[in-house]
Amino acid sequence: MSNILTLQEYEAIAASLTFPSMSFIDGAFRPAKSGKIFATTNPATGQHLTDIAACGPEDVDFAVAKARQAFDDGRWSKLHPNERKEILINLSKLVKRNRHELAVMESLDSGKPISDCENIDVDEFIHLMNWHAELGDKIYDQTAPVGPDAVSMIVREPVGVVGAVLPWNFPLLMLVWKIAPALAAGCTMVVKPAAQTSLTALRIAELAAEAGLPKGVLNIVTGSGAQVGEPIGLHQDVDMVTFTGSTSTGRRFLRYSADSNMKKVVLELGGKNPCIVLDDAEDIDYVAQQVCAAAFWNMGENCSAGSRLIVQSGIKDKLLERVKVHARSWKVGNPLDPQNALGAMVDKAHFSKVESYLTKGKEAGYTLVTGGESIDGTYIQPTIFDGVQNSDELAQDEIFGPILSVITVNSFDEALSVANDTDYGLAASVFTANTKKALRAAQAIKAGTVTVNCFGEGDATTPFGGYKQSGFGGRDNSIHAHDQYTELKTIWIDLNDTTVDGSID
């Protein structure tokens, strides 16, 4: 908590902020070519923050052209990896220097609790930018064992112009998940932040230019999915798209690729993630803490949220007693107050969607363990419904809010079956004192990340992405994220000393 200031200090920073309002293309802030704008507001207060450029296909064309020019002339792609590393580390230092400003801007724009913005989003941005910057000059290419008559080289080359389309739930974190490995690999980028949360992406682009990133390398195009996201997906001169968001939108990017230039597509999509607690789980109070963190962190607006608690009958009552206690410690309110663990839903439309599941849970007759109410048309209490069946709507839909469904099972095998009974496969957790059961569960659960006796997503060194309808084409984080922004090329050199007619020279 060393980075945390007081509420009064955060309010003073908020009052002093100047918000970026235009897209950032070719090293400069620019209005939309149409002149259109859209308003961005603080979801916690309804306060108007600023008007942002509402870009369209013509702005995407301009940004892609500048990114293509920057890639082809080698101002970034042909730099020595050490030079790219130095610039990206400079960016990390500038983010650290401006950390409080970025954290407050993120909180105001998204409704996220300031403590999360400071200690997770900003900290992880700094760490991941440094990690991928350092990785850029440490990944070695290869040779193949082809015998004495030839030499083969297997080399990586940057894929080219990358389009990145971001979600609104982790604006800074998802930005760095995309730009850090792509820029370290030598790509140039056109980034579309979510319309609800564009501010910090624009500020990062400004800091990147200050850090020495050449013009045209990182372009931020603001606007709607229809006017910016779709044109990026369909653009003939974008070589790859990386997208984090809903599964339904992810499907569109696969179609866009097929309908354009067959660009590479990497998708990190939705989840309805199981948290399995077996009868032999130890330290029930700790388990309860982890269950609440999995369900309620970031207001449940998290694709890896553990929103299905699959608990064995012998331990359920004891566990729910402790979960209820810990859930009540998740204070809801003003996102700028460091004492609050839950902030506002990102906008009114999403609030209404999440609130509707409170109504559905009550109408279905589930046992309301705790919560169940909305506050001021803005906040949702951390809520737990018991008695949910896995086939029910609350157990199958990705609610993206702080609502936990409790599903009771009688055996280990039943727990695994229920865990896999979903279209998703992003993340899962299992709590047990039995090492063999833990390993069997980790092997059997169809998910990209399985944590044992904890909730988490791994770290910078581990790949993050999903099975089934939770992912496609690659992973974020780790060396594997770096690899997906490169193409593999084989260079074959024949060492036979022969003339064209086959005789020895």
Image: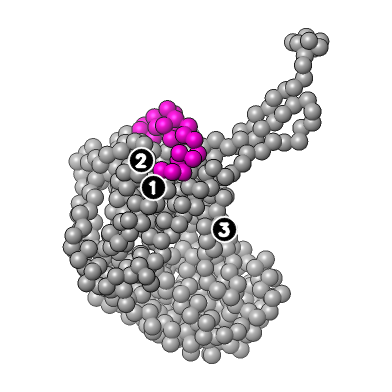
Q: Residues within 10 Å of mark 1 (few under 14, many from 20)?
A: many
Q: Which residues are magenta?
A: 65-87
C-alpha separation, residue under disc 2 versus residue under disc 3: 29 Å
Question: Which of the two discs, 2 and 3, sits closer to the camera?
Answer: 2
Residue 89 drawn above or below residue 111: above
Which residue is at a point 56% across and 78% down the rendered structure image?
310
Crowding at label 2, few (<14), some or many (≥20) Cα neighbours within 10 Å? some
Query: Which amino acid, mark 1?
Result: Asn
Residue for point 25% across, 67% down:
10
Label 1 close to label 2 by CB (< 8 Å): yes
Identify the mark at residue 138; answer none if there is no mark: none
The label number, if any, that marks residue 462 in the structure image: 3
Picture coordinates of residue 143, whole percent (x, y): 69, 36
Name the residue carrying label 1. 90
The disc, 3 or 1, on the residue closer to the chain's N-terminal end is 1
What separation in Å lies between label 3 and label 1 (alpha carbons)? 24 Å
Q: Which residue is mark 2?
A: 212
Q: Quadrant of the N terminus?
A: bottom left
- Quadrant (top left/top right/bottom left/bottom right) for the C terminus: top right
- Viewer-side label of 3, 1: 1
Q: Is residue 342 magenta?
A: no
Q: Using the image as rendered, state which of residue 378 and residue 178 is in the foreground.
A: 178
Q: Amino acid at mark 2?
A: Gly
Q: Is residue 414 left or right of residue 397?
A: right
